[in-house]
Image: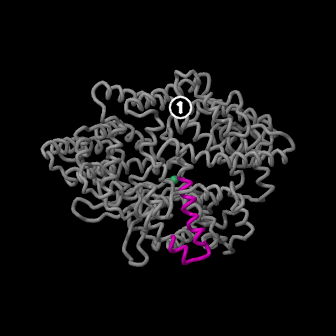
Amino acid sequence: MGQAPAAADTLLKGEGLPDYQAITPEAVSQGMPWLLEQLEAELARIESNLGSQGDALRWDDLMPPMQQLGERLRWSWGVVNHLLMVCNTPELRQAHEQQQAAVVRFSSRLGQSKAIYRALKQLSADNQLTPCRRRILQQELLGMELRGVGLEGAQQERFNALTEELTALSTRFSNNVLDATASWELLLSSPEEMDGCPDSLRELLADSARRKGHEQATAADGPWLMGLDYPRYGPFLQHSSRRDLRETVYRGFISRAASGEHNNSDLVGQILALRQQKAALLGYGNWAEVSLASKMAPSVQAVEALLEDLRAPSHSAAQQELKDLEDLAGAPLQPWDVSYWSEQLRRQRFDLDSEALRPWFPLPQVLDGLFNLCGRLFDIRINAADGEAPIWHEDVRFFRISDASSGEPLAAFYLDPFSRPGSKRGGAWMDDCLGRHTSPDGSKVLPVAYLICNQTPPVGETPSLMSFGEVETLFHEFGHGLQHMLTTVEEPEAAGINGVEWDAVELPSQFMENWCYDRPTLDGMARHWQTGEPLPEAERQKLLQAKTFMAGAATLRQVHLALTDLRLHEQWRAEDGQSPEQLRRQVAESTTVLPLLEEDALLSSFGHIFSGGYSAGYYSYKWAEVLSADAFSAFEDAGLDDEQAVQATGRRFRDTVLSRGGSEAPADVFSAFRGRPPSAQALLRHSGLIAA
Ligand code: ZN
């Protein structure tokens, strides 16, 4: 097989913390082909060994070698992807692009290996298996079945052709949305046209104008270039007092990619039809059933029932909210007015300027508050360990977590908090650097997480002053991190967030967000960075009230999208003569409070379900929110002022949700924590949709 290329040593190490600085584009170009060749050979060796095992096949013959094979790929390709997101350069992007197809090809080969599939089947017939191992095998088998391993000959060829065609169509779909969005613009030249717009938006629009050749454009004097991307569209509808312009922009937005050169209208039906064919080949009645096969939600009916639980109260709340807005406006509203009048009402009711709270939330203090909270709830200690691990940027920090009672080390994490436009992807996420497992030499490996945010960086002597939204985001990602790091599962396939169903994975993250509003937590972290003054109680009250402002409309919108997605993938058939958009309009009758406009063609830009991973899965947001709200309500029931009860409930959360993760069905893990199945009541109450 030959020596590994020297430049790729650091990339191919395959264990421990990566040496980020040494992983160069050259290492990627030389190392990945070599690694894939090794893994191909290893896979072939495992497959041929299986043939000679006969009936005597045991777990240890198959699962550890397969896990190690997967881990080598995950370790090397994972760090390349990580660097691509946090230290992007054109050279690295090119090196990544050149290797991607080969990695995908290898993964497909792995996913459709009949020898491996048969061996997994054989193992799963053993009735001595632990429940965790049984679940791992079930998930592996189902995953391979959904990738078509069970199909033969022409059927498998047809299936693979459908998969390829769908990949191409969803890329076209997303390119059309990008291009249609980018090709719409509106140049605003007189100050009256910018009436109501805040400075940050003027700045952004002037910057857009400069990029399009209006070099003299300034935030104060224009011209300003309006577009349909969210950073421009959202704030414009919210702040512009020019009703005529809001209408123009709104109509442009809702009809994106629905006509002309970048038209997705036909793709929507084609994608749905191809998915239906794949579902039929796999032996399912429709694509919604395929999607739900690997999720926590037991059936389409169960998802429908949850959405109905949310729909009825949010519909009446949204009607009342609309009435309040119309009272303030003194006239009936059109869809392009809602965002603007919401902002007016929000200001009037709460007098809340979210920017003005930043001085109370300097990052170091917020971290102290978060770490103290985790100590209280989960009996862990978090200590800075900067300098003890290689990093990819000077802003990156490193921490270790230990058990507070026993002192035993449990895990570690990186925190990369600040935005770095141009080289770091936007948004926030948690990813695994190392998962909990036992390495081939028998030593225990502790989990290490990446926590990545994009918050406001420090300026000079001023620390990073966080908006309340940034604080919530940090808590959210830390919740994912806790599930990754506090796992006690010994099987790596089910440790941490591995094996947690898509519609349950947001439980610990959304759960942690609730604590940002908790008085002791807030008191512990919100102090003015210069004066030390605590956050005034009046401001805390405003934060609490603003949390449920317009919650009816927000919930109803999610229900509309989720139900549309579900019904399209369950019920829509080309031969019935109804267009997908017509089906959506039927759903809209009970899930919107303002009638849809003629040109409203949301499906043509609904990337989540036509080019993202959310097909027949958009409901997952709300499904997980039911779990997280209900989990938090266990603390409310125990009494948030009763420190002993809070701690006892926190320990139980650690021992169930955070510790068992993917080793058991999420419904069982939830019941173990809550003592009963989940209920939507807490979410409705937290959203202000039923009385507290
Ligand atoms: Zn999340």
Can residue 73 be seen at all in this image of the molecule?
yes
Check the picture and name the quadrant holding the N terminus: top left
Task: Place residue 562 in its image quadrant.
Answer: top right
> Mainly helix, strand or loop, the magenta region?
helix
Q: Residue at x 70, y 33 (%)?
A: 596
* Above or below: residue 413 compared with residue 425: below
Task: Place residue 642 in its image quadrant.
Answer: bottom right
Magenta stretch contains residue 646: yes
- State yes or no: Cβ of the residue under disc 1 lies below 8 Å from any atom of ligand 1: no
- Residue 409 horizontal/vertical position (percent): 37, 71
* Above or below: residue 383 compared with residue 138: below
Which region of the structure is painted magenta? Answer: 624-649
Q: Residue at x 67, y 46 (%)?
A: 312
- Pick whichever, 464 or 640, lies toward us: 640
Can residue 529 be seen at all in this image of the molecule?
no
Magenta stretch contains residue 567: no
**What amino acid type should be assigned to the residue bearing mark 1?**
Gln
- Residue 245 horizontal/vertical position (percent): 77, 35
In the picture of the structure, the residue carrying the numbered disc 1 is: 571
- Pick whichever, 539 or 271, lies toward us: 271
